[in-house]
Image: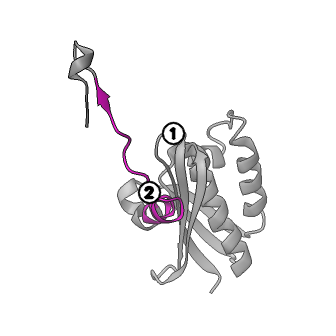
């Protein structure tokens, strides 16, 4: 099989914050070929989105893909890859260049923006990367201060 669909996503909790990237590759009939979930450490959501794409593209090149439909819920990334937006942020430029180089190794591809609801598998993988590979951290303790310091309480 040389035709695939790549769903890709990235997530950051805090932006920047603990981040993960996910890629879900399947055949046109829906058979899963690969699931990739990578913890990225502390970074931004946009960097995580690009990393998810890069992980998926590297796997597709390894599989010898000849035709790929890329689906992502990052409108910014999709528009940058299509040439509709310029890549301005210095952290995204090398990721964009790497994505372009990988795309050149795939003879035929298309890139499509999809709504988050249509990208559930990649979203699941990017969040799994944060939860399992990065260690889910509990919410920080919030300290509330009343008018008097004696009435301080933590929740």
Q: Nearer the viewer, residue 58 or 43?
A: 43
Q: Which residues are magenta?
A: 123-144
> How many labels, in total?
2
Coordinates of residue 69 in the picture (x, y in percent): 57, 67
Is 149 above or below relative to 18?
Answer: above
Coordinates of residue 21 in the picture (x, y in percent): 56, 59
- Determine the secondary structure under disc 1: loop
In the rendered image, which quarter is residue 114 located in?
A: bottom left
In the rendered image, which quarter is residue 51 located in?
A: bottom right
Q: Nearer the viewer, residue 75 or 92?
A: 92
Q: Most extreme residue toward the top, as rendered?
A: 147
Question: Which mark identifies residue 118?
Answer: none
Residue on which the image places disc 2 = 136
Specify the quadrant that holds the C terminus.
top left
Q: Most extreme residue toward the front, as rendered?
A: 150
Mark before the other along the chain sequence, 2 or 1: 1
Is 150 above or below relative to 34?
Answer: above
C-alpha gap between disc 2 and disc 1:
16 Å
> Which residue appears at 52% of the width and 49% of the height?
18
> Which residue appears at 48% of the width and 65% of the height?
132
Asked if residue 142 can be seen in this view, the reply is yes
Residue 8 located left or right of residue 82: left
Residue on which the image places disc 1 = 15
Asked if residue 82 can be seen in this view, the reply is no
């Amino acid at each position: 099989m040389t035709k695939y669909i790549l769903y890709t996503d990235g997530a950051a909790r805090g932006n920047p914050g603990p981040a993960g990237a996910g890629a879900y590759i399947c055949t046109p009939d829906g058979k899963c070929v690969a699931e990739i979930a990578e913890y990225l450490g502390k970074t931004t959501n946009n960097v995580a989105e690009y990393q998810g794409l890069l992980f998926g593209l590297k796997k597709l090149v390894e599989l010898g893909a000849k035709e790929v439909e890329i689906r992502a819920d990052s409108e910014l990334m999709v528009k940058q890859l299509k040439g509709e937006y310029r890549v301005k942020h210095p952290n995204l430029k090398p990721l964009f260049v790497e994505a372009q180089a990988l795309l050149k190794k795939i003879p035929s591809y298309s890139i499509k923006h999809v709504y988050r609801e249509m990208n559930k598998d990649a979203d699941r993988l990017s969040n799994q990367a944060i939860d399992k590979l990065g260690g889910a951290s509990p919410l920080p303790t919030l300290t509330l201060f009343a008018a008097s310091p004696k009435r301080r309480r933590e929740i």
